[in-house]
Image: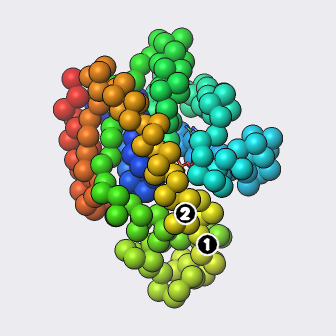
Amino acid sequence: MTKGNNIKVILLGLPGSGKGTLADFLKKKYDLFHLATGNLLRAAIQNNTPLGKEAEGYMKKGELVPDNLIINLVKEEITKGGKDGGFILDGFPRNIIQAEKLDKMFEEVGQSVDMALEIIVPEEILIQRLTGRRTCAKCGALYNIHFSPPDVENVCNECQGELFVRNDDTVEVVDKRIDVYWKNISPVVEYYRTKNLLKEVNGGSSAGETAADVAKIIEELP
Ligand code: AMP
C-alpha cells in the first residue's frame, strides 16, 4: 500500500476546472473510490428514476438540487463504496450545510476528511473549456472544440458516434453555474481552511502538470 490509498479527499473547483480528469488520475494512482454527485445525478436522469425527475429541472437551470436529495445520495454511496477505503468526493460538498453534514456522516463511521483540494483556474479558460466541451453519445469520449477537437466535426474519432453538448454547458447556464458556485463554495473553502485541511493547486496548465502537482501534495501530507 502506498501513501494516499486511504486518503479522503474533496475536490473543490469551478465547473470545468478539471475535477473529473484529476479524479480519474487519483482513482487509478491510489485506487480510490470516486464519488461524483453530478455524474450520479445525470445517470439518475438518464434512467428516469424519481431522484432524476426531481433533480432535472434544477440542473437544467444551473441551480443546486436540494440538500436533502443530495445528502441522501451521498450517504448511500459512501456506504456502498466501502467506508474504510479512500475516497474522492467530486462535486460534494457544494455549500456549508453539505460540508457540515459530511463531517457528521464520516464521524458516525469513525472517519474524517484528510484534505480539501481547490483547483484554481482563470474564468476565461473555464468558459472555453465548458462551452467547447463535446461528449460522444455512444461511447462517452470527451472532446473540446478549442483544445482537442475530433478529426471530423461532431463525429467521435473512436466509434463514429455523434457528439453532443451537455444541456448545462451552454453559455447562459455556464454563467449561472459559475455564479452559483462562488456564492455557495466560498464559505466551504473557508470552512476547510480553518480546519487546516485546504490545499490549492493550479489547474490552468495541462492535466499532466496538475496531476503531478497533486501527487506531490499527497506525498507531503503528514
Ligand atoms: P457537476 O457535474 O458537478 O458540475 O454538477 C452538475 C449539476 O448537478 C450542478 O449544476 C447541480 O445542479 C447538480 N449538483 C451536483 N452536485 C451537487 C451538490 N453537491 N449539491 C447540489 N447540486 C449538485
- For label 2, the residue is 172
Quarter in which the C terminus is drawn = top left
**Nearest to the observer: residue 5 or residue 12:** 12
On the question of residue 52 being in view, the answer is yes
Left or right: 200 as drawn, with respect to 24: left
Amino acid at circle 1: Phe
Residue 12 is situated, as x and y percent measured from the top left of the image, at 39, 40
- Ligand 1 has an atom within 8 Å of the beta carbon of the residue at disc 2: no
Left or right: 135 as drawn, with respect to 6: right
At 39% from the left and 46% from the top, the residue drawn is 13
Residue 214 is situated, as x and y percent measured from the top left of the image, at 26, 44
Q: Nearer the viewer, mark 1 or mark 2?
A: 2
- For label 1, the residue is 164
At 41% from the left and 30% from the top, the residue drawn is 188
Amino acid at circle 2: Glu
In this rendering, the answer to whether 110 lies above or below 34 is above
On the question of residue 24 being in view, the answer is no
Element at badge 2?
A: helix
Answer with the quarter of the image where residue 154 lies: bottom right
Answer with the quarter of the image where residue 111 lies: top left
Left or right: 1 as drawn, with respect to 184: left
User: What is the distance, in whole Å, between disc 1 and disc 2 at their CAs?
Assistant: 17 Å
| Residue closest to the far bottom | 152
Residue 58 is situated, as x and y percent measured from the top left of the image, at 67, 47
Tags 1 and 2 in contact by the CB under 8 Å rule?
A: no
In this rendering, the answer to whether 215 lies above or below 10 is below
Element at badge 1?
A: strand
